[in-house]
Image: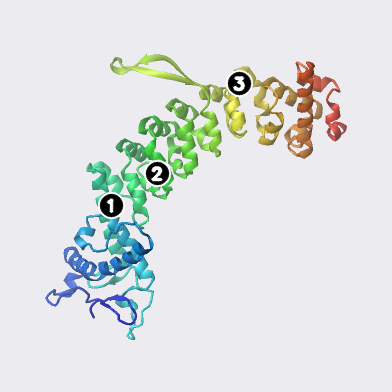
Amino acid sequence: MQARMAERRKFIAISERTAAAWWQWPDEVWRKWPLLQRIRLRHTMADHVLPLLGKLEDLYLKQNMGAKPRLSGRTLEQVETDDVAIEAGLYLFDLAVSEGLLIFAESVGKSGIKRNDAPEWGAVGSCGLSIDAVKRHYLHMAAGLIMEKAGHDAAEHRGKFESLDLEDPANLAKFRLLVKLDPVSVRELSKGLKGHLEKLMEAEDEYLEILHKVSPIKFLRALRYGLGDQFPRIVEWSPEFIAAVAEGLDHSAKITAIGETLMLIEDPEVVRALGTWEVKETDPTTGKGGKKRRNYTTRIEQVKKHLGMDFPKLLLCGPEVVEEAGRWKNDEIERIKFYLPHLTLSVLEQIKALDFEQKVGLLEGLWAKLGREFVESDMHDKQGLKVLHDIVVEIGAMKERGTAPEDLGKVIEDSDMFDKFMGRFLKRR
């Protein structure tokens, strides 16, 4: 039975004799030898499948004015030199199969009634290839055309890209983005991902577009050095997060200074806040061959060293505290680091009107007067936040009168000046 358009059912059926000429014998050889298989496959595609896909494309173009035809009116030879046309053809092929417009002998019973359970793994048609094998053939053909366009002729890069998973036509769009990356970016990503570039196929298109914009040396290499064995986890970042890293940590010295601690951050705004911290150029050093090397010191490195194990606690305090922390002096950091875990967003909102000394003094005074339980627990609920609010309002009023205390912590601890705002927490002592 030859491929035909069923007059009543309007579908094309591909049988085991489709595109198999009488002189092509023995038939078994034509189904096994790759060169002979491709001859039959191309005849089937050119004479039966492509015309159907062209008609489907015409229907689509009628509903989407302005779209450019990729298959309609073109020969198979022309389509096979155009990666975008192949991609369009693969989408339309799946559509034709799913809608029952293109079926295979194994899915047509003796009655001629079409069924939609055509095998994907077994051989179909006269070429001896499965549907999936044919799709892979054209996917890799499109991938080769994409690489040729991008100019990646070097065997090193071809090997990296050819190892990527292209089982789905949807991956071709991502493949184009990857192939167009700067060759140095490809090298850095491949090293950082330990050769597993295929992990990037799981990333969103927006994520890959960001990789096109960043510096392969100042950003990707710095990330690779800074993150070490944690580098492969960057594929878990959202487009918003990697954008924040690229924008906030805009100097390689910032990236290497934060190091693996970067992987503890979940809020992209915290990364941007870290990016506001100062970077200073220091005296250059002379390397091999007498070449001078520029050196930098970062506030990130200094604060990280000063806080030690408490540095991650600072990063959990939200972007407002992190940005402010970049301006803290070392002695101020020493004073406040004890309270870092308790500087939640709601607490910060209540005490934001106070300067640094007053913030620390307020926390020290409340700890001394109301105890650990208040600062660690009660201060964060509605009544505890009201205590903070009322004290801050009172301090603001005192400041206007010129009577604000110099040592707020000591006044709270040793006097009853602010006791009226503490209510039940004071009585509980």
Residue 264 in view of the camera: no
Q: Residue furthest right?
A: 427
Q: Mark 2 packing: few (<14 Cα in 10 Å), some, or many (20+)?
A: some
Q: Quadrant of residue 416?
A: top right
Residue 231 versus residue 399 in the image, above or below: below
Residue 272 got which mark? Answer: none
* Element under disc 1: helix
User: Which numbered disc, 1 or 3, marks the residue that appears first in the sequence?
Assistant: 1
- Residue type for callout 2: Leu
Q: Residue at x 30, y 68 (%)?
A: 55
Give the residue at mark 2.
208
* Element under disc 3: loop
- Residue type for callout 3: Trp
Q: Residue at x 79, y 37 (%)?
A: 383
**What is the CA distance from the residue labelled 1 to the residue labelled 2?**
17 Å
Residue 298 left/right relative to 397: left
Tell me the colour scheme of the image: rainbow
Residue 263 versus residue 162 in the image, above or below: above
Residue 8 left/right relative to 428: left
Residue 387 versus residue 147 in the image, above or below: above
Give the residue at mark 3.
328
User: Which numbered disc, 1 or 2, marks the residue that appears first in the sequence?
Assistant: 1
Give the residue at mark 1.
143
Which of 405 and 333 lies nearest the eye of the viewer?
Answer: 405
**What is the CA distance from the residue labelled 1 to the residue labelled 3?**
53 Å
Residue 401: percent from left, percent from top: 79, 18
Quadrant of the snapshot with the C terminus: top right
Residue 312: percent from left, percent from top: 58, 32
